[in-house]
Image (tube, rainbow, N blue to C red):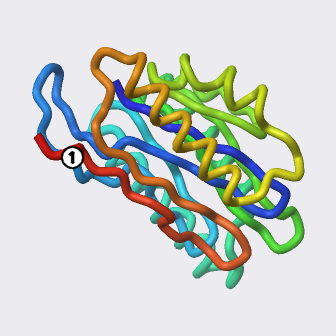
């Protein structure tokens, strides 16, 4: 029942993810950050089995940092996305990772980038992307309202509308979410939405 969404603007990417950790029908906690930074200007949004999600994200982060240390320059967002897709494809034939993800980043030359990937190593560069049951309700709305000159404030407002739609329409909607922005200044948390007090 996870929910991840991303919107690419002219000079930024806004992503949102639920913060619920669950095992089958049991909720374990409401403060797990599934929007994991790769470096100062790139992050992965991961959903799937907790063990696969954590192990795979740490593997990608470690190899990206190793490349940066060995070659004295960081990988671009496109390079990280292609490396990630390659590792998912390799693992698919050995011991697949049950994880779907979005990769968001900002590069000096290319600007903002948003990539969608699933556990079968399918990859697409997108303007609007999402994964999880909640995205079924929100993708059409985001696609209709997206435009190339979207401001950061408008993108955050769209994310909040998406969260409200998920809460209204999904029976087992996660109660808490975090919204982050990636732009030339780096990664920052814009808003954290916690469960309402009972």
Regarding mark 1 in the picture, which secondary structure is present there?
A: loop
| Foreground pick, 191 / 102 | 191
Q: Is residue 61 visible?
A: yes
Q: Is residue 28 above or below residue 108?
A: above
Image quarter in which the C terminus is found: top left
Name the residue located 49 percent from the left edge and 37 percent from the top edge.
4
Name the residue located 68 percent from the left edge and 84 percent from the top edge.
72
Q: Is residue 125 visible?
A: no
| Foreground pick, 16 / 43 | 16
Q: Residue 195's spot in the image, x, y percent?
A: 24, 44
Q: Is residue 170 left or right of residue 153?
A: left
Q: Residue 28's spot in the image, x, y percent?
A: 12, 39
Most distant residue in the bottom direction: 72
Badge 1 crowding class, 10 Å Cα cut-off, few under 14, some 14 to 19, many 20 or more, is some
Name the residue located 67 percent from the left edge and 79 percent from the top edge.
185
Picture quadrant where residue 89 is located: top right
Q: Residue 95's spot in the image, x, y percent?
A: 38, 28
Q: Is residue 95 above or below residue 65?
A: above
How many marks can you see? 1
Q: Residue 159's spot in the image, x, y percent?
A: 57, 43
Image quarter in which the N terminus is found: top left
Picture quadrant where residue 27 is located: top left
Q: Is residue 133 left or right of residue 181?
A: left
Name the residue located 38 percent from the left edge and 57 percent from the top edge.
192
Q: Is residue 102 left or right of residue 179?
A: right
Tell me the residue that label 1 is attached to: 30
């Amino acid at each position: 029942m996870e929910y991840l969404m991303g919107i690419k603007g002219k000079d930024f990417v806004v992503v949102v993810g639920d913060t619920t950790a669950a095992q089958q029908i049991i909720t374990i906690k409401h403060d797990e950050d599934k929007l994991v930074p790769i470096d100062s200007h790139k992050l992965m949004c991961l959903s799937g089995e907790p063990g696969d999600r954590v192990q795979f994200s740490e593997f990608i982060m470690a190899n990206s940092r190793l490349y940066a240390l060995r070659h004295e320059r960081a990988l671009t967002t496109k390079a990280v996305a292609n490396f990630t897709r390659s590792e998912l494809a390799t693992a698919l034939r050995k011991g697949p990772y049950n994880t779907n993800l979005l990769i968001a980043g900002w590069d000096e030359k290319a600007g903002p980038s948003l990539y969608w990937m699933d556990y079968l190593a399918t990859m697409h560069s997108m303007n609007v992307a999402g994964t999880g049951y909640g995205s079924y309700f929100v993708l059409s709305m985001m696609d209709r309202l997206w435009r190339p000159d979207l401001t950061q404030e408008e993108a955050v407002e769209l994310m909040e509308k998406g969260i409200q739609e998920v809460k209204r329409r999904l029976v087992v909607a996660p109660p808490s979410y975090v919204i982050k922005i990636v732009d030339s200044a780096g990664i920052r948390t814009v808003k954290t939405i916690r469960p309402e007090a009972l």
